[in-house]
Image (cartoon, rainbow, N blue to C red):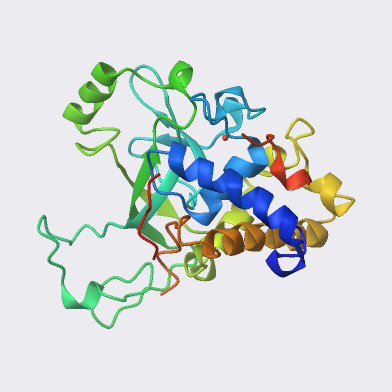
Amino acid sequence: MTKGYDAVPDEERDRLRRYLEAVVAARTAPVHTTVAFNAVYFGYDLGGDGYGGSPLCLDDFPVITFGDCAPVLPVGAMVCVATGSDPLYAEIVHREGAHPEVGALGDVPAWVSGAPVGAEGPGRPGNDAAPRRRELLVPDLHAFGPALSLSPAQLHRLRTRRRWINEDGHVVVDVCYPSPEAARRDDLTAYADHLLTTARERLLSPFVPVSLAGLVGGTHDDDLRAGLLGLLDTVRGVLNSRRTVTYMGSLRDDPGLPRGLLAGQRTLGRR
């Protein structure tokens, strides 16, 4: 599967497809390619615990702090939203730009549409080497099961206060990109970068069902990247192969089976 969808035998594709069908049916949020990869790689429990029983270390998650500029958090990133009391653990299932000049009804100045990250106005693309963009992140606040989720009453209080999350349960934050090039990357490439840097320990954990290092035979960066992109291509290919399993694709590209299936519902709108 590290070689990509076309290299995978039909029997293994079918096993992966059956698992992903069950994941899509079990999730209450859109299933993007990167979210589907997480489910397979880290072992998403289909009985209701989600990632609650997985080998993930919550202390390693990037922290989103109110008022601070956040690191790049692509779809699939697992995060901790720091609140005034209990932290919110979540998996990002969608993101989009949230420019401060966009009106409440979606009206937007003409120059904002299609402008590069960091643009300062019409005809002013900006020259910041590390541009910022305000983004709206949609977190799945129940991805880690009931033991690690806040109660409905607690979430209601947070939504009412509209400080850490808004009334819809979304996070609006300024994201700092390391370069203009990084800001233009598609979601799959951005998530591969995230796993190989910010979430590297998580990716190479010896406690996941089958570690990428074991699949590619080492920890050389080029081998890891090639293997990871191959796995993502395999998952995307399986999601594309059946109409019964549809998913949320990149916005910028204008359970019955064993956990760790890489070793061997509802229908969502596809973009």
Residue 77 in view, yes or no? no
Looking at the picture, does residue 118 appear above or below residue 28? below
Q: Nearer the viewer, residue 120 or 29?
A: 29
- The outermost residue toward the right is 217
Q: Quadrant of the N terminus?
A: bottom right
Q: Quadrant of residue 25?
A: top left
Count of residue discs: 0
Q: Residue at x 9, y 58 (%)?
A: 105
Residue 249 in view, yes or no? yes
Q: Residue at x 33, y 71 (%)?
A: 119
Looking at the picture, does residue 97 appear above or below residue 85? below
Residue 165, position in %: x, y? 28, 35
Q: Quadrant of residue 103?
A: bottom left
Q: Is residue 51 left or right of residue 102?
A: right
Residue 225, position in %: x, y? 73, 60
Q: Quadrant of the C terminus?
A: bottom left
Q: Nearer the viewer, residue 22 or 48?
A: 22
- The outermost residue toward the left is 105
- The outermost residue toward the bottom is 123
Residue 66, position in %: x, y? 34, 35
Q: Is residue 205 left or right of residue 233?
A: right
Q: Nearer the viewer, residue 85 or 119?
A: 85
Q: Is residue 150 left or right of residue 40?
A: left
Q: Residue at x 68, y 38 (%)?
A: 202
Residue 242, position in %: x, y? 52, 61
